[in-house]
Amino acid sequence: MKILIVEDEVILNKTINTSLKESGYEVESAYDGKKALDLVLVENYDLIVLDLNLPFIDGMDVLKTIRKNDDETKIIILSARSQIEDKVEGLDYGANDFLEKPFHLDELKARIRSLTRRRFIQNNSLLSFDGITLDTKTRLTKINNSSIILTRKETGILEYLLINEGRPISQEELIEHVWDSSIDMLSNSIRVHISALRRKLKKELSYDPIENRIGVGYLLRKRK
Ligand code: CA
């Protein structure tokens, strides 16, 4: 799950960034509206936390620009402007949620979980597939109810495959959603993480639950 934080208050931005990373998200930060739009053009975010009062391009204009051709990315507006008009305008222009400053980080995280879940019609924080369960809140993975140790990247890959169950995911798409762009990714390296994940899952399940369809991508498969 990849998140962009657009907030010009440096300390607040960094605090949110660190806290969301600790919760297992891939997180990037932008400190003005122009940079945010630059990033949105080249990156594929699942969710954007967007402040309204921003240098260069106002948050509301950032929202409008994104929504011109993207209805998918979830957007939570963050604002010190408490006026009801801002809230209404933001929601009218396609924001998914609105959080008034000051807010508690736990509240932001709960809203993020709720929005990313809603997209995939999950009723709780658990993703599951044929004996595999991943708690998106605690980042713990269990196989037939016993915990297994996965790295942060392995967990991210598994989460993305679970969310997109039934749809083959290409290496490129995994890189876009599971890695942050600050890391220079070689396709070799993602293969290493995927094989490590497959090995660990196979050891517990006694079959390999990740199918690699050559030229198409990876997808979860059930025990035969
Ligand atoms: Ca601001």
Image: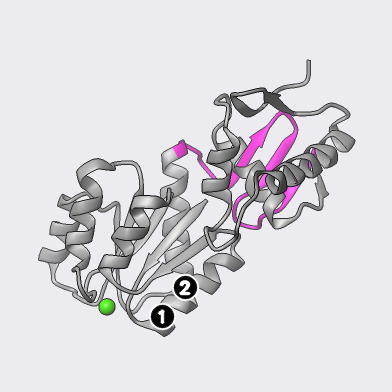
Labels 2 and 1 touching (C-beta < 8 A):
yes
Q: Is residue 66 above or below residue 71?
A: below
- Please give the name of the residue rendered at 32% of the width and 59% of the height, measured from the top-left corner: 38
The verdict on residue 3 being magenta is: no
Residue at disc 1, CB closer than 8 Å to ligand 1: no
Location of residue 72 in the rendering, given as x and y in whole percent from the top left corner: 34, 41
Judged from the image, the secondary structure of the residue bearing numbered disc 2 is: helix
The residue lying furthest to the top in this view is 224
Front residue of 11 and 28: 28
For the residues marked 2 and 1, what is the alpha-carbon distance in whole angstroms? 6 Å
Q: Residues within 10 Å of mark 2 (few under 14, many from 20)?
A: some
Give the quadrant of the C terminus. top right
Residue 151 location, x and y as percent?
75, 55
Question: Which residue type does callout 1 highlight?
Answer: Leu
> Residue under circle 1?
12
Residue under pointer 2: 16
Residue 44 locus on image (x, y percent):
43, 48
